[in-house]
């Protein structure tokens, strides 16, 4: 698929240039890794001995924090350069992290019901079919397992530019088909990457259709009233760029029982 080599190359460049996405976990963050990972209280009090999949999250931050908290960590990423950062940092800190280079929508190398937690930062925008990703996560996550994810919102990806009054213009259709075209406003777009818009029925409804229940949903604050025009935090005053979702994997049997219990003859 053409988007895979293009996105691999884009993220390899970002890793080589040490972009903001390659911020390694610091000693201070590793002293209290769960608080660093989870200011909302979505994670259990301890992840000691739990199997955690850090999905599409290479870069030497998330995997290192989970490993420092005692989890058995697997990190998956399309970019070998991003994964090198995880490998190098884990070795430096004496931590065990399993490295897997593959696309987020093809986890065939991983076993069914292998993980207790799947944690995925912003990344689903780089694949055309988000439900294919959800199906793979549902397969490798144990019933009752936790899936924490963050996504770019549709409206944020629809913005193309600012007008003369510095108002943001929604210039792309909501029912956009195929890869997103290049646009003038690049505040929440990565150079050289192929991205796709996923609608709310795909982002949220797709989770429900693939065996998850949603327990919480947040919009991370990216607004700053003092930010200059054109800054990404100025843009964040008008459009929420991200949505963060806490979901729980349910078993087929549980889903059937719950559905049948709602039936009134």
Image (tube, rainbow, N blue to C red):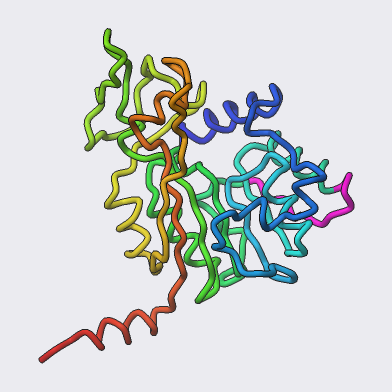
Residue name at image x 51 percent, y 21 percent = 191
Is 97 magenta? The answer is yes
Residue name at image x 43 percent, y 16 percent = 230
Residue at the left extreme, as displayed: 265
The part of the chain drawn in magenta is 91-101
Residue 124 as seen in the image, left or right of residue 121: left
Residue at the bottom extreme, as displayed: 265
Q: Position of residue 227 (x, y in %)?
A: 48, 21
Residue 260 as seen in the image, left or right of residue 214: left
Instruction: Give the image quarter of residue 165.
Output: top left
Residue 205 as seen in the image, left or right of residue 133: left
Residue name at image x 57 percent, y 72 percent = 113
State whether residue 53 is above or below residue 64. Answer: below
Q: In this view of the protein, which residue sits in the foreground, 75 or 40?
A: 40
The quarter in which the C terminus is drawn is bottom left
Q: Position of residue 221 (x, y in %)?
A: 46, 40
State whether residue 150 is above or below residue 263. Answer: above
């Amino acid at each position: 698929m053409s988007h895979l080599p293009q996105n691999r190359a884009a993220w390899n460049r970002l890793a080589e240039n040490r972009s903001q996405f390659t911020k390694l976990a610091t000693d201070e963050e590793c002293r209290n890794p769960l608080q660093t990972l989870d200011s909302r209280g979505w994670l259990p009090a301890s992840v000691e001995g739990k199997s955690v999949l850090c999905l599409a999250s290479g870069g030497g931050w998330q995997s290192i924090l989970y490993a420092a908290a005692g989890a058995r960590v697997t990190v998956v990423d399309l970019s070998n350069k991003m994964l090198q950062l995880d490998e190098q940092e884990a070795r430096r800190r004496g931590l065990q992290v399993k490295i897997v280079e593959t696309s987020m929508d093809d986890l065939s190398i991983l076993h069914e019901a292998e993980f207790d937690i799947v944690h995925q930062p912003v990344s689903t925008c780089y694949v055309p079919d988000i439900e294919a990703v959800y199906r793979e996560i549902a397969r490798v996550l144990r019933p009752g397992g936790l899936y924490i994810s963050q996504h770019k919102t549709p409206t944020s990806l629809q913005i193309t530019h600012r007008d003369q009054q510095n108002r943001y213009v929604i210039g792309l259709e909501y029912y956009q088909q195929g890869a997103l075209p290049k646009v003038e406003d690049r505040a929440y777009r990565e150079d050289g990457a192929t991205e796709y818009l996923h609608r709310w029925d795909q982002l949220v409804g797709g989770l429900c259709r693939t065996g998850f229940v949603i327990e919480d949903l947040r919009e991370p604050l990216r607004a700053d009233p003092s930010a200059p025009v054109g800054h990404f935090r100025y843009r964040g005053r008008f459009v929420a760029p991200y949505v963060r979702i806490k979901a729980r994997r349910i078993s087929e049997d549980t889903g059937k029982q719950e559905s049948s219990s709602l039936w009134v003859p």
